[in-house]
Image: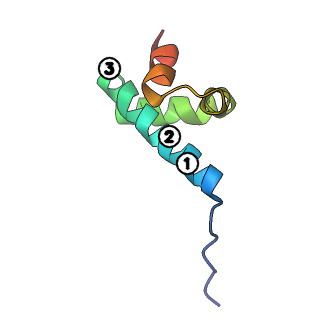
């Protein structure tokens, strides 16, 4: 039986989109795509906090690169 695709709630979708944008800024800052993805995965709680604190993806990337 095929697995039914789960629908994400709008808040989760927004967080994923935000992290994707952070990832792009990390790459512009010198990280490889793999490094950016790994860092976000390892620090997911910290990035989630920054998302809910209202930081822009660019601001979050600057924090991560500092």
Q: Residue at x 59, y 28 (%)?
A: 54
Residue plotted at (62% across, 28% down): 43
- Identify the residue at image location x=62%, y=68%: 7
Q: Which residue is drawn at 69% across and 31% down?
A: 45
**Coordinates of residue 28 in the picture (x, y in percent):** 30, 25
Secondary structure category for the residue under label 2: helix
Viewer-proximal residue among 50 and 5:
50
Protein image colouring: rainbow
Q: Tell which of 46 and 30 is nearer to you.
A: 46
Numbered circle sitting on residue 18 = 2
> Farthest residue toward the bottom?
1
Residue 13 locus on image (x, y percent): 57, 53
Label 1: state its secondary structure.
helix
Distance from disc 3 to disc 2, alpha carbons, whole Å, reads 19 Å
Residue for badge 3:
30
Labelled disc at residue 14: 1
Q: Distance between the residues labelled 3 and 1?
A: 25 Å
Left/right placement of residue 49 relative to residue 19 reads right
């Amino acid at each position: 039986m095929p697995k039914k695709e789960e629908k994400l709630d709008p808040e989760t979708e927004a967080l994923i989109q935000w992290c994707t944008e952070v990832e792009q800024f990390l790459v512009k800052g010198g990280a490889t795509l793999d490094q950016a993805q790994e860092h976000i995965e390892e620090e997911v709680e910290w990035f989630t906090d920054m998302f809910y604190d209202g930081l822009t993806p660019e601001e979050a990337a600057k924090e991560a690169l500092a």
